[in-house]
Amino acid sequence: MECYFCKQNSREIDFKNVKLIKKFVTGLGKIRSRKASGLCLFHQRRVANAIKRARNLGLLSPTSKS
Ligand SMILES: [Zn+2]
């Protein structure tokens, strides 16, 4: 599987783009593993950071049950 963000040619991940980063969070609110997300190491780190920032700002619930 090809890395989603490499394919998009984007190096930065906008943490305000909740819809997008939610794709990389499991139903239990956990960050998907690289195996599951198919991201490269670089973007996996970026996504993890974006998720943490979004959570800190309350954009993303720590555990989403919806
Ligand atoms: Zn990548």
Image (cartoon, rainbow, N blue to C red):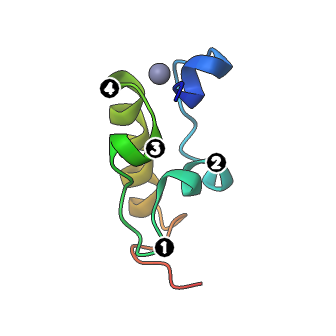
Depth check: 56 or 10 in front? 10
Quadrant holding the C terminus: bottom right
Disc 2 target residue = 20
Specify whether 19 is left or right of 2: right
Task: Give amino acid for label 3.
Answer: Ser
Residue 27, numbered circle: 1
Q: Residue at x 45, y 36 (%)?
A: 38
- How packed mark 2 is, by other alpha carbons closer than 10 Å (few <14, some 14-19, many 20 or more), is few
Q: CA distance from mark 4 to mark 1?
A: 22 Å
**Secondary structure beneath label 2:** helix
Looking at the image, how many numbered discs can be counted on the residues? 4
Q: CA distance from mark 2 to mark 3?
A: 12 Å
- How packed mark 1 is, by other alpha carbons closer than 10 Å (few <14, some 14-19, many 20 or more), is some
Q: Residue at x 52, y 26 (%)?
A: 3
Q: Is residue 11 above or below residue 53?
A: above
Disc 3 target residue = 37
Query: Foreground mark, 2 or 4?
Result: 4
